[in-house]
Image (cartoon, rainbow, N blue to C red):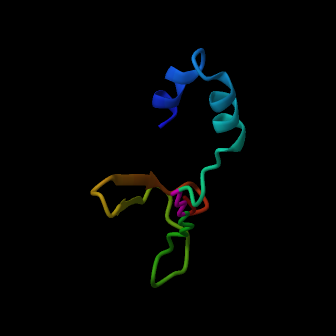
Amino acid sequence: MDKLVSFFRLSNNSFYNTYFNERAINDPKKNFTEIYARIVNKETGETIEGALMKAIGSKGTEFTEVSNYQGNS
């Protein structure tokens, strides 16, 4: 819409300025997800360094992380 309104910048400057001063984006679609993981040995409870963790998003995007010396990502 902004591109269309830009055509009125010179021919109807009042409309153009009002549009850009009054417009607002309601309900922007942004979703953030964070995952915190700690990888431990089931039997000993010791942290595991270098474990590869993988998650696949709803659109098929693949996320990978390797645990650090504390077993955290």
In this view, 59 is above or below 16:
below
Location of residue 71 by image quarter: bottom right
Q: Position of residue 30 (x, y in %)?
A: 53, 56
Q: Position of residue 66 (x, y in %)?
A: 46, 53
Residue at 64%, 49% (x, y): give it. Answer: 24
Closest to the observer: 22 or 70?
22
Q: Does the magenta run of residues contain 31?
A: yes
In this view, 49 is above or below 13:
below
Residue at 64%, 37% (x, y): give it. Answer: 19
Q: Position of residue 41 (x, y in %)?
A: 47, 76
Q: Does the magenta run of residues contain 21?
A: no
For the record, the magenta segment spans 29-33
Location of residue 68 by image quarter: bottom right
**Residue furthest left in the image:** 60
Residue at 55%, 60% (x, y): give it. Answer: 32
Closest to the observer: 32 or 12?
12
Q: Quadrant of the C terminus?
A: bottom right
Magenta-drawn stretch, dominant element (helix, strand or loop): loop
Count of numbered badges drawn on the protein? 0
Q: Position of residue 57 (x, y in %)?
A: 35, 61
Location of residue 60 by image quarter: bottom left
